[in-house]
Image (cartoon, rainbow, N blue to C red):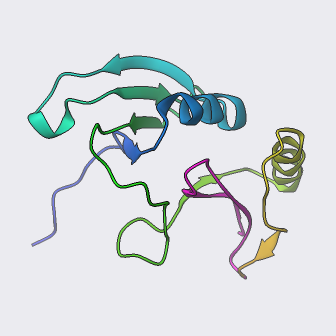
């Protein structure tokens, strides 16, 4: 039996060390806009959460700053999330992102060629890995 379908991604939730620093990064570097700030919810989620929405793609990020948390940094080698990737349409768009990251003082990888796509990697203030992705074909 095939699994049921879903229509879109609702949101991606990220745990951060400093909500103000992370929200500023996502607004300035990736163009997200503040949607709502929340504190209600189940007991494990009653901590500051800022919802951000990307106007062009509709992607929603939930930025969470738990009251009790570890102070370690994101590690893509641990089981869990490896990275998040956003897609661009063409080479000029990829080059525009590279120039934007540099203008914002965000360190990034050189353009990498995976054979089926080209991409540039960078990280947010907590080390959460992102890619700007240009698929082939």
Nearest the viewer among 76 and 133 is: 76
Looking at this rendering, what residue extends furthest in the bottom direction? 115
Q: Quadrant of the N terminus?
A: bottom left
The answer to which quarter of the image holds residue 111 is bottom right
Nearest the viewer among 95 and 107 is: 107
Who's the residue at 80% across and 53% down the image? 90
17 up-or-down from 112: above or below: above
Instruction: Tell me if residue 24 is in the magenta stretch.
Output: no
Image coordinates of residue 51 in percent, x first then y, are: 41, 27
52 up-or-down from 89: above or below: above
Who's the residue at 25% across and 22% down the image? 39
Helix, strand or loop for the magenta stretch, by majority:
strand
Who's the residue at 35% across and 55% down the image? 70
Q: Which residues are magenta?
A: 115-137
Image coordinates of residue 112 in percent, x first then y, are: 78, 74
132 up-or-down from 3: above or below: above
80 up-or-down from 47: above or below: below
Instruction: Tell me if residue 132 is in the magenta stretch.
Output: yes
Image coordinates of residue 102 in percent, x first then y, are: 88, 47
The answer to which quarter of the image holds residue 119 is bottom right
Q: Is residue 69 left or right of residue 75?
A: left
Who's the residue at 58% across and 33% down the image? 21
Q: Quadrant of the C terminus?
A: bottom right
The answer to which quarter of the image holds residue 16 is top left
């Amino acid at each position: 039996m095939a699994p049921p379908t879903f229509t879109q991604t609702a949101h991606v939730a990220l745990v951060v060390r400093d909500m103000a620093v992370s929200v500023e990064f996502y607004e300035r570097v990736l163009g997200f806009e503040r949607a709502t700030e929340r504190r209600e919810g189940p007991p494990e989620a009653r901590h500051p959460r800022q919802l951000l929405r990307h106007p062009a793609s509709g992607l929603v990020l939930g930025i969470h700053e738990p009251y009790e948390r570890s102070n370690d940094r994101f590690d893509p080698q641990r089981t869990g999330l490896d990275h998040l990737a956003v897609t661009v349409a063409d080479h000029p768009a990829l080059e525009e992102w590279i120039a934007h990251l540099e203008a914002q003082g965000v360190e990034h990888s050189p353009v990498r060629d995976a054979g089926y796509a080209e991409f540039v990697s960078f990280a947010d203030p907590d080390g959460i890995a992102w890619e700007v992705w240009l698929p082939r074909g």
